[in-house]
Image (tube, helix red, strand yellow):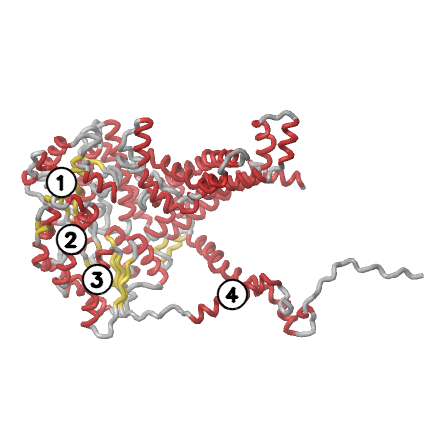
């Protein structure tokens, strides 16, 4: 006796009439519609993303007077870059800023996140908003604000520091090459500590509470719990924040440009790589050299990001999981 | 979603795209109806031209002039981009002096401005205007811009504080006299004779120009380490560094207002344009301020220098060059209009004939009754020339770096071996500029 046909367990999805290949139009649109949907993005990306990238690579091998006049110079732009004192100044300044962004800003962000993650703290939401809000106003506003705060003689920062530790009232934060970078870092802390705190806070809240309970049962104190539970728990987010903060630091432009009154500051103390690129490309009109700077920055950023990912063990962890 | 198989989200996107496309098609960008478009970066110029343009339009029936105010930094970048892309290029444009050189990069045929040399010669403008003011807008003997102004410098001082201290400004003839006074009046960290910058060249430049120095010579060679520059640096740095400094700087805006009101500064370097800023920003000092000419470097030498400037250029894209030239003449050569504009801006025009207008001889209550225009007009013919280069931006940055290095050195080691240091540091900066010039294949 033949077995009864097995029941069809596949969910029955109601198909629209357009799935019915009776009409040529529907068959045609079924085939081409996905391409049409992605076409706007592809066209715009090719036009405003891909072509400028290709064009900038071509420009990097030319000396230019704007985009119209170009003279092929081979790798001369890159060769000159390697002995360009101003470029090294820009790289040094940007690296110092990036270093402090990573090793000062991120621990502060994590510390704040840990504090605001405590259930006993009253008004946590208000604090979160307060710490995050500087990020809402943007670097230009912060630049203007801090240029006033850092004013010698009458500025609030000098007034306070004079009263507290007796620094001279006419300390010139933005005119003394030695103080420009600290001023930049202080300003950026005000913007970004709260911003990165939000990432850490979200990561902390996703750590399994049962792990803490288990650690407590095992006799781990707060510090041990932080090292053994919290740090591994927030590692993916920490790596993300680390990489984005580093890339963001190397893209620094608006803040020093505004803070130092549309300049690189005294003795180029606030010159960043992107500012140097901008000056070469759009002030002196040498788009070729600016492109060479841009490509060097991009390659440098790629190397740094790869090193960071390697050192943070992200790939190793992924391999183990697999 | 019966007839649309890709879901509601995709359908919504499609509908939005179609609707926004239709909206854009129904609202195209308004067509330009202006015959001439002119950009300026200075609000006082903009306001003055708004008043002047109706007369030009009335004299040229059917002509419409569109004047646009564009912020200085944005104006330079937008103009550069407009030249590069051949899009949205204005017919006439005012360019700030420190940006002008960057538009002269490349061969003459690549300069985006029309060559005005023949028109300038035909109208005898080199004789009628202050000839030195054409220099920054000239490349290889070709004039690409008309000077809007002369910007002679004087010293604005607190007349009441000078009177209290028993200082007679009439007796200050040379910088030596002025420095001597500075040592008498300056109280470190509390009161300085003059606002002087120790970290950029804004106040160093007038001193350099007064001595006949500059960044470049007329041929475009970098001269920022010549003997004049060395001597100017050797003179300037001890005024802003070390224990006997007589100058300091705090910043602009409200800070400067307070510093002048508090008597932190007795004096400010005052080109004509800055007197208007001082009037507006420090109104409480009305009647307490006065002006005196720059002290001379040597007895009998020029009593002024220059700070800032603006040119008006006609772009090559302008389809009606003759009409644009007529507009330029209307804005820059109409004496009655220039006189009225002076009342609003305090800026001495480059046209010498205009200085005879009554407006330039009116006493100004803010400046203790001084005839402001007359005091500047008297100095205007002595204003030194400065020369353009596409590398002016870099040169200024390098000179600022040299100044900062010299100030630091003087603060740490004083005058010991200072001169060789200054020579070497200026040479380093100048050589860096020369390397860039040599790299330029144009």
The mark closer to the camera, 1 or 3, is 1
Q: Secondary structure at mark 3?
A: helix
Q: Earlier in the sequence, mark 4 or mark 1?
A: 4
Which is nearer the N-term, disc 2 or disc 4? Answer: 4
Q: Sequence-wise, which precedes: disc 1 or disc 3?
A: 3
What whole-number distance in Å separates the C-alpha atoms at marks 2 and 1? 19 Å
Indicate which disc residue B17 carries. Answer: 4
Q: Is residue B402 above or below residue A54?
A: above
First in sequence: mark 3 vs mark 2: 3
Query: Which residue does the numbered mark 1 point to in the structure image?
Result: B158
Q: Quadrant of residue B68?
A: bottom left
| Tag 2–tag 4 contact (CB < 8 Å) | no
Q: SS at mark 2?
A: loop
- Mark 2 and mark 1 lie on one chain; the one further toward the N terminus is 1
The residue identified by callout 2 is: B346
Q: Check chain identity for marks 3 and 2: say if they share one.
A: yes
Q: Is residue B367 left or right of residue B89?
A: left
Mark 2 falls within which chain? B
Residue B322 position, x and y percent, is 22, 69
Is residue B359 rendered to the left or right of residue A138?
Answer: left
Q: Give the letter of the chain under mark 1.
A: B
| Rendered position, A210 above or below B86 | above
Name the residue rendered at 60%, 36% in the picture: A233
Q: Quadrant of the C terminus of chain B?
A: bottom left
Element at badge 1? strand
The one of A126 and A64 positioned closer to us in this rendering: A126
């Amino acid at each position: 006796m033949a077995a009864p046909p097995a029941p069809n367990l596949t969910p029955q999805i109601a198909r629209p009439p357009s799935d019915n290949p009776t009409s040529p139009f529907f068959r045609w649109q079924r085939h081409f519609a996905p391409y049409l949907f992605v076409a706007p993005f592809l066209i715009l990306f090719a036009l405003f993303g891909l072509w400028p990238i290709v064009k900038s690579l071509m420009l990097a091998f030319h000396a230019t007077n704007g985009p119209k006049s170009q003279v092929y110079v081979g790798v001369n732009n890159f060769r000159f870059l390697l002995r360009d004192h101003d470029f090294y100044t820009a790289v040094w300044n940007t690296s110092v800023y990036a270093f402090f962004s990573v090793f000062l800003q991120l621990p502060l962000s994590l510390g704040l996140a840990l504090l605001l993650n405590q259930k006993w703290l009253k008004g946590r939401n208000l604090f979160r908003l307060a710490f995050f809000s500087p990020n809402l106003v943007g670097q230009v506003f912060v630049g203007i604000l801090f240029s006033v705060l850092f004013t010698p003689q009458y500025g609030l920062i000098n007034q306070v520091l004079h009263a507290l530790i007796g620094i001279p009232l006419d300390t010139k934060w933005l005119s003394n090459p030695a103080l420009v970078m600290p001023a930049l870092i202080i300003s950026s802390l005000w913007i970004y500590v709260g911003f990165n705190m939000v990432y850490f806070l979200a990561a902390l809240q996703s750590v399994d509470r049962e792990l803490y309970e288990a650690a407590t049962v095992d006799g781990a104190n707060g510090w041990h719990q932080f090292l053994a539970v919290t740090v591994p728990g927030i590692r993916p987010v920490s790596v993300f924040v680390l990489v984005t903060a580093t890339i963001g630091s190397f893209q620094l432009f608006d803040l020093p440009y505004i803070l130092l009154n549309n300049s690189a500051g005294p003795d180029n103390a606030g010159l960043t790589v992107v500012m140097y690129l901008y000056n070469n490309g759009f002030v002196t009109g040498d788009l070729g050299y600016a492109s060479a700077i841009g490509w060097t920055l991009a390659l440098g950023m790629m190397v740094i990001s790869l090193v960071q990912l390697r050192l943070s063990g992200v790939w190793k962890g992924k391999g183990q999981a697999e | 979603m019966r007839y649309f198989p890709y879901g509601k989200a995709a359908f919504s996107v499609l509908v939005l795209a179609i609707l926004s496309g239709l909206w854009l098609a129904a609202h195209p960008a308004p067509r330009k109806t202006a015959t001439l478009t002119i950009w300026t970066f200075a609000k006082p110029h903009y306001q003055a031209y708004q008043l002047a343009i109706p007369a030009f339009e009335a004299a040229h029936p059917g002509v419409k002039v569109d004047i646009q105010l564009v912020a200085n930094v944005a104006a330079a970048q937008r103009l550069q981009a407009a030249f590069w892309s051949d899009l949205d290029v204005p017919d006439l444009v005012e360019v700030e002096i420190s940006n002008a050189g960057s538009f002269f990069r490349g061969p003459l045929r690549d300069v985006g401005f029309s060559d005005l040399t023949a028109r300038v010669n035909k109208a005898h403008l080199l004789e009628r205007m202050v000839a030195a003011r054409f220099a920054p807008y000239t490349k290889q003997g070709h004039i690409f811009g008309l000077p809007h102004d002369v910007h002679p410098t004087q010293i604005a001082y607190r007349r009441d504080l000078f009177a209290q201290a028993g200082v007679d400004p009439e007796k200050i003839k040379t910088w030596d006299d002025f420095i001597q006074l500075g040592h008498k009046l300056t109280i470190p960290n509390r009161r300085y004779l003059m606002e002087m910058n120790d970290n950029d060249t804004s106040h160093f430049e007038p001193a350099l120009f007064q001595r006949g120095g500059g960044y470049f010579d007329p041929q475009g060679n970098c001269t920022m380490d010549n003997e004049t520059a060395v001597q100017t640096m050797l003179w300037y740095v001890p005024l802003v560094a070390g224990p006997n400094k007589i100058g300091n700087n705090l910043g602009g805006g409200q800070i400067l207002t307070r510093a002048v009101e508090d008597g932190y500064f007795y004096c400010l370097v005052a080109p004509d344009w800055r007197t208007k800023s001082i009037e507006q920003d420090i109104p409480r000092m009305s009647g307490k301020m006065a002006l005196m000419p720059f002290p001379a470097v040597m007895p009998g030498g020029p009593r002024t220098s220059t700070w800032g400037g603006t040119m008006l250029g006609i772009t090559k894209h302008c389809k009606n060059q003759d009409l644009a030239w007529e507009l330029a003449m209307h804005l820059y050569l109409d004496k009655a209009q220039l006189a009225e504009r002076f009342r609003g801006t305090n800026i001495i025009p480059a046209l010498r004939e205009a200085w005879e207008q009554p407006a330039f001889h009116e006493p100004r209550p803010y400046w203790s009754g001084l005839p402001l225009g007359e005091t500047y007009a008297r100095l205007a013919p002595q204003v030194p020339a400065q020369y353009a280069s596409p590398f002016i931006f870099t040169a200024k940055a390098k000179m600022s770096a040299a100044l900062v290095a010299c100030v630091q050195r003087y603060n740490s080691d004083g005058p010991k071996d200072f001169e060789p240091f200054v020579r070497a540091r200026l040479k380093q900066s100048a050589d860096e500029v020369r390397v860039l010039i040599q790299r330029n294949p144009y």
